[in-house]
Image (cartoon, helix red, strand yellow):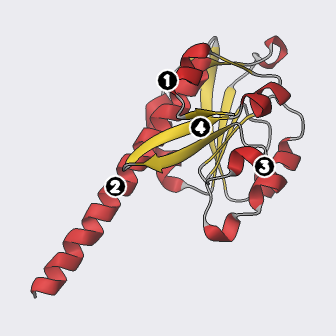
Amino acid sequence: MKRFLILIIAIVSINICKAQDARFKALFIYNFTKEIEWPAGDKSGDFVICIVNQNDVLNQIKTVTNGKMVGSSPITVVGVKSIEEISKCQILYLPFSDSKADKLGSALAKVGESPTLVLSDRPGSLKNGSCINFLLVDDKIKFEISKKAIADRKLQVSANLLKLAISVE
């Protein structure tokens, strides 16, 4: 009975940690909209955030952005199940698991040269074209930035955001 109780506590703790991680990532994603500048021609219509196959973050970002705007554009959050479903979006969050390690290249090909802020959460993703990469450091969500990837996507990053990153490449 004691082992069963310990197992239940461990499972609940893991789920709470996952929910907190998703909430923090959602808050970061929303705040990135304030610290990244998109080209003037990309400021009409809805501001679209695409979340690939990650229901925890998808639900949290929908809650965080409900009724919010980026400039004069309402935020729309879209969940996509696969890379093939990605359409025009200003932010693309591509979470990884070991089975999806090769998906960043496919996602980058799908968005082409559009001014899309590409986010990931796998170490080394900046070297493969991700703009911002989430990392877990001392049980806290942190992020690193690739100024080159952001510039290549015709986006501008604020000095404030660069200061908050744990590393800038």
Marks 1 and 4, the one that precedes in the sequence: 1
Secondary element under disc 4, as helix, strand or loop, is: strand
28 in relation to 95, above or below: above
Say the numbered circle drawn on residue 144.
4
Amino acid type shown at disc 4: Glu
Q: Nearer the viewer, residue 14 or 159?
A: 159
Say the numbered circle drawn on residue 128.
3
What whole-number distance in Å separates the C-alpha atoms at marks 1 and 3?
A: 34 Å
Residue 98, given in percent of the width and then of the height, sits at: 63, 69
Marks 4 and 3, the one that precedes in the sequence: 3
Q: State the image quarter where residue 76 is shown.
A: top right
What whole-number distance in Å separates the C-alpha atoms at marks 1 and 4?
A: 28 Å
Quadrant of image for the C terminus: top right
Q: Residue at x 88, y 48 (%)?
A: 109
Say the numbered circle drawn on residue 17.
2
Marks 3 and 2, the one that precedes in the sequence: 2
Amino acid type shown at disc 1: Gly
145 in relation to 4, above or below: above
